[in-house]
């Protein structure tokens, strides 16, 4: 029924358009109808070009005004500060170039709109000008590349050390698990071949012949001590996944058949982030939206939504199948003391398979 | 050529062969007919691709809302009007595949390379009419298979247009990786064969069949763009073919090129030693040049249209050619920027950051040269010109965010988010579509002998232009909020609840933009039959195609092919009464040719 309705509306629109063009063509009969732009068209469209420039500027300003509160808060990891700084420098540059080039493009389109009898300037080449706008991007980009590469090397160089906490992130359709190395600080060898051992209790396929594996701890919620480097080792058991932790400016793909790495040092605890004024405002806004939705739900006999409280997230960011959109794990950053208390309460692999 | 020789020539080509309906309209070997076939097939695929995007935009804006239209169009995949998550993924996959390959590669390059290469260089036809015909029919066959794959039991391919294994290799991983994926691979393999035959033909034609006087430095920039695009295609498409073949081997014959250590659906699979990262390298070795295979023809078309309608020579012809060549070269060594966080060695990431950001330089040169071409022009704001200016605008806006994504460091946190979606839609999607529209409005008189309605064209442009920014500008913010792409809904994360407004806004703009394309379609079909009859050179353009008669004929020109005496951009040249001097007009005695 709906489709019939839509279809008939479309047909009617088509007929209406046809009629309008017909009327338009008939009313233009007397003049030369070439379908080539005349002075009137040039004038109108030139002015519209100028209006369009204003539209782009207004859209930009409006978006920043209205949507800046959805952006990610200040980075919660140590390298995240450098990341954000590089981001803002790049953005400043982009906005500068965007503002000027769009202005020139649309202003020229307006200013030089055609008129009968006018003649354009024959201006085919200017080596000097072209040199200038080749050299300027070269210098700017050289700076950006150097700065970027310096930061990149800094972030991506993972050095094994005794201080760091080693955590395995284990991905599967459609959930995450985390494995801590336990007291020996070494993750036991693992392979998907061992997943079916111990009646399926071997959740990440630890190799039972490797003694390092027995004190490993497997959990479904990621706890990280603040201020200590965490070296993540990523694995996947089925398809590609990507471990994305936006608040920490961290991401790495999980690839079946290989172990990938990413390391960062969390610097803001979950509690601290909840008290961040930006975050308070964001959570307040989200809860307002949820409250309104709840009212609708309750009115139609459903249960209301829970109020939202902020938590760090680990999301899957590589298409992995039907429930890709809901493959998540909670991350809790806490003091070293709280972390120690939490980890002590968890069962080791040896305890689980007993 | 002497008169006698010319007459012989005329007899060779000028007379009409006895043509039946089949040889004229179906299995035609005439480049002009093949170009129309490409355009119409491309537009048909475009309708499907755009319609799909509207369906998933509805889903994203109102994720819990059932829609009657879903139930009607998707049937059992949308019970009670609620879209199934697998179908959502299938829609984004097929939307991407169709738009990138079938519309913007075949529809754009296929149409205009075929139409313009022989006409603008002064050739009777392509080097091989037969190969050209086979190329089109292979494309048609691959389109049919791709459309057919929408109707298989378990649904079409749904692993994203990049079809990364293991997701695409294992039917256990998602329903779309069964028959749907097989058909996708077969369709793409045929598509690649079509593209290769086409590209080889374009290259040979440009090198061998230029008319007298048409030196490489006098070639219109359109031809330079098509020529270089064809070379990139020949270099990179075979690599995708090998990736597809290896994937077919893994899927059907138990090899392990891309697969290793997999446990799925309670079962350990036998695959050992392969790596999905290898697939990513092979895919992007084509995948990135593909961006330029899509974009360069659009830029070539824009160069021609901007110069013609500004009534000015294109500024910096040499620099424009140099930047096309530079972009083409660099495009083949930047593929790794799609893989910064794929698990490949970070040092490799550094190298790809370097090469990637270098591409900004020739791109910037092109943008500045377009702007300078407008300066002090006498702009004839025809619909084609508006789309060309629009292209420069979206090319700049979309290109600039490439500076962020091409930087390996910054890519970490925006990789695969909506920021990427916004970036590439503006810089290659919308820009290339604008190139396609500009080309259609500009060369419609050449293709169909009639003019399109300009007022509908203006309406089409302005609505599309506003909506394109309305859709993709706010989308950057969704990405910077941290929302990954290819999510069926973001309601699983209360953290993203505040993005609902933006999603609704984007969808509304998208729906209006979709409706505006109906105006174009109407204008296109109506003008084909009832449009005002075209003059020989309606835009007062310099290039050779406008010296050919309006009525199509086999061999393009009655009598001798015009000779070329100057470059294509003598617009508003001092000392000439008219504001254009076509390429076949000899230099006046005291006239100097520009050295370029």
Image (cartoon, coloured by chain):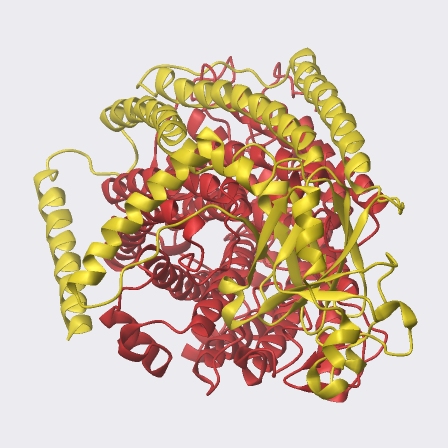
Chain colours: A yellow, B red
A224 relative position to B150: left or right? right
Task: Judge by depth and name the residue closer to the eye, B220 or B319.
Answer: B319
Answer yes or no: is residue B205 visible: no
Q: For the point 35% across and 28% down, which residue is it? A: A62
Position in image of residue A328 (x %, y %): 55, 60
B236 relative position to B535: left or right? right
Answer yes or no: is residue B311 visible: yes
B374 relative position to A194: left or right? left
Relative to B218, residue A192 above or below: below
Quarter holding the C terminus of chain B is: top right
Position in image of residue B388 (x %, y %): 45, 36
Position in image of residue B357 (x %, y %): 71, 34
B83 relative position to B98: left or right? left
Task: Judge by depth and name the residue closer to the eye, B121 or B240.
Answer: B240
* Count of residue discs: 0
Relative to A108, residue A275 above or below: below
Q: For the point 58% across and 51% down, which residue is it? A: B294
Quarter holding the N terminus of chain B is: top right
Position in image of residue B199 (x %, y %): 67, 59
Task: Judge by depth and name the residue closer to the eye, B332 or B585.
Answer: B332
Relative to A195, residue B125 above or below: above
Q: For the point 19% across and 58% down, which residue is it? A: A296
Task: Judge by depth and name the residue closer to the eye, A297 or A251.
Answer: A297
């Amino acid at each position: 029924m709906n489709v019939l309705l839509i279809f008939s509306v479309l047909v009617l629109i088509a007929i209406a358009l046809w009629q309008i063009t017909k009327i338009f063509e008939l009313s233009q009969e007397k003049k030369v109808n070439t379908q080539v732009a005349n002075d009137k068209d040039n004038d109108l469209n030139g002015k519209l070009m100028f209006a369009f420039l204003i539209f782009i500027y207004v859209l930009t300003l409006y978006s920043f005004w209205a949507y800046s509160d959805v952006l990610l808060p200040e980075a919660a990891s140590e390298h995240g500060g450098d990341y954000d700084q590089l981001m803002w420098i790049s953005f400043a540059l982009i906005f500068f170039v965007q503002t000027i080039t769009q202005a020139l493009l649309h202003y020229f389109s307006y200013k030089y709109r055609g008129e009968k009898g006018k003649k354009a300037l024959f201006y085919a080449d200017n080596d000097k000008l072209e040199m200038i706008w080749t050299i300027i991007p070269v210098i700017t980009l050289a700076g950006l590349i150097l700065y970027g590469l310096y930061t990149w090397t800094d972030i991506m160089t993972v050095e094994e050390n005794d201080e760091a906490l080693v955590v395995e992130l284990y991905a599967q359709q459609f959930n995450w698990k985390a494995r801590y190395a336990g007291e020996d600080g070494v993750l036991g060898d693992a392979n998907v071949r061992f997943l079916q051992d111990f009646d399926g209790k071997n959740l990440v396929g630890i190799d039972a012949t490797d003694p390092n594996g027995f004190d490993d701890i497997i959990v479904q919620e990621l706890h990280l001590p603040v201020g200590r480097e965490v070296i993540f080792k990523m694995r996947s058991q089925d398809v590609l996944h990507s471990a994305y932790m936006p608040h920490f400016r961290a991401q790495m793909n999980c690839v079946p058949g290989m172990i990938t790495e990413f390391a960062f040092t969390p610097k803001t605890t979950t509690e601290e982030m909840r008290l961040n004024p930006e975050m308070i405002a964001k959570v307040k806004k989200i809860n307002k939206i949820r409250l309104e939705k709840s009212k609708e739900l309750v009115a139609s006999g459903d249960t209301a939504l829970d109020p939202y409280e902020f938590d760090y997230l680990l999301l899957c960011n590589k298409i992995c199948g039907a429930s890709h959109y809901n493959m998540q794990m909670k991350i809790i950053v806490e003091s070293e003391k709280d972390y120690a208390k939490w980890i002590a309460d968890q069962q080791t692999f040896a305890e689980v398979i007993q | 050529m002497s008169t006698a020789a010319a007459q012989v020539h005329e007899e060779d080509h000028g007379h009409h062969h006895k043509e039946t309906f089949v040889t004229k309209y179906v299995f035609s070997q005439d480049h002009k007919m093949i170009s129309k076939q490409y355009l119409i097939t491309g537009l048909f695929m475009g309708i499907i691709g755009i319609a799909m995007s509207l369906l998933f935009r509805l889903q994203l804006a109102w994720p819990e809302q059932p829609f009657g239209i879903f139930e009607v169009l998707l049937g059992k995949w949308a019970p009670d009007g609620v879209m199934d998550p697998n179908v959502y993924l299938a829609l984004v996959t097929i939307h991407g595949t169709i738009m990138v390959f079938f519309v913007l590669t075949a529809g754009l390059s296929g149409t205009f390379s075929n139409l313009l290469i022989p006409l603008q260089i002064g050739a009777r036809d392509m080097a091989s009419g037969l190969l050209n015909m086979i190329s089109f029919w292979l494309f048609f066959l691959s389109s049919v298979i791709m459309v057919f794959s929408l109707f298989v039991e378990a649904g079409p391919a749904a692993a994203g247009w990049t079809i990364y294994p293991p997701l695409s290799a294992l039917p256990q991983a998602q329903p779309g990786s069964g028959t749907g994926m097989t058909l996708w691979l077969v369709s793409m393999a045929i598509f690649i064969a079509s593209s290769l035959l086409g590209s080889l033909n374009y290259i040979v034609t440009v090198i061998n069949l230029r008319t007298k006087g048409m030196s490489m430095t006098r070639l219109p920039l359109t031809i330079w763009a098509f020529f270089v695009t064809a070379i990139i295609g020949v270099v990179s498409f075979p690599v995708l073919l090998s990736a597809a073949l290896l994937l077919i081997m893994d899927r059907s014959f138990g090899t392990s090129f891309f697969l290793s250590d997999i446990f799925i659906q309670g079962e350990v699979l036998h695959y050992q030693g392969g790596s999905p990262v290898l697939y990513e390298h092979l895919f992007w070795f084509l995948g990135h040049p593909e961006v330029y295979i899509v974009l360069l023809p659009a830029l070539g078309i824009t160069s021609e249209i901007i110069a013609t309608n500004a009534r000015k020579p294109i500024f910096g012809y040499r620099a424009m050619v140099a930047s096309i060549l530079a972009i083409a070269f660099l495009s083949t060594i930047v593929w790794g920027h799609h893989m910064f966080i794929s698990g490949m060695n970070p040092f490799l990431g550094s190298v790809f950051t370097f090469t990637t950001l270098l591409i900004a330089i020739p791109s910037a040169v092109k943008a500045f040269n377009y702007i300078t071409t407008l300066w002090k022009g006498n702009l004839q704001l025809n619909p084609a010109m508006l789309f060309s200016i629009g292209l420069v605008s979206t090319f700049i806006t979309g290109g600039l965010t490439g500076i962020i994504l091409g930087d390996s460091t910054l890519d970490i946190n925006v990789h695969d988010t909506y920021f990427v979606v916004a970036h590439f839609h503006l810089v290659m999607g919308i820009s290339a579509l604008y190139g396609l529209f500009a080309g259609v409005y500009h060369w419609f008189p050449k293709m169909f002998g009639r003019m399109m309605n300009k007022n509908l064209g203006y309406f089409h442009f302005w609505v599309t232009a506003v909506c394109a920014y309305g859709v993709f500008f706010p989308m950057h913010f969704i990405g910077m909020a941290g929302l990954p792409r290819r999510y069926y809904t973001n309601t699983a994360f209360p953290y993203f609840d505040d993005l609902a407004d933006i999603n609704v806004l984007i969808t509304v703009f998208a729906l209006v933009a979709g409706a505006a394309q109906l105006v174009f379609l109407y204008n296109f079909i109506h003008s084909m039959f009832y449009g005002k009859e075209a003059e020989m050179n309606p835009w007062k353009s310099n290039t050779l195609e406008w010296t050919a008669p309006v009525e199509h004929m086999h061999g393009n020109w009655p009598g001798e092919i015009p000779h070329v005496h100057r470059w294509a951009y003598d617009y508003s040249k001092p000392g000439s009464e008219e504001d254009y001097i076509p390429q076949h007009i000899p230099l006046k005695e005291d006239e100097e040719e520009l050295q370029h």
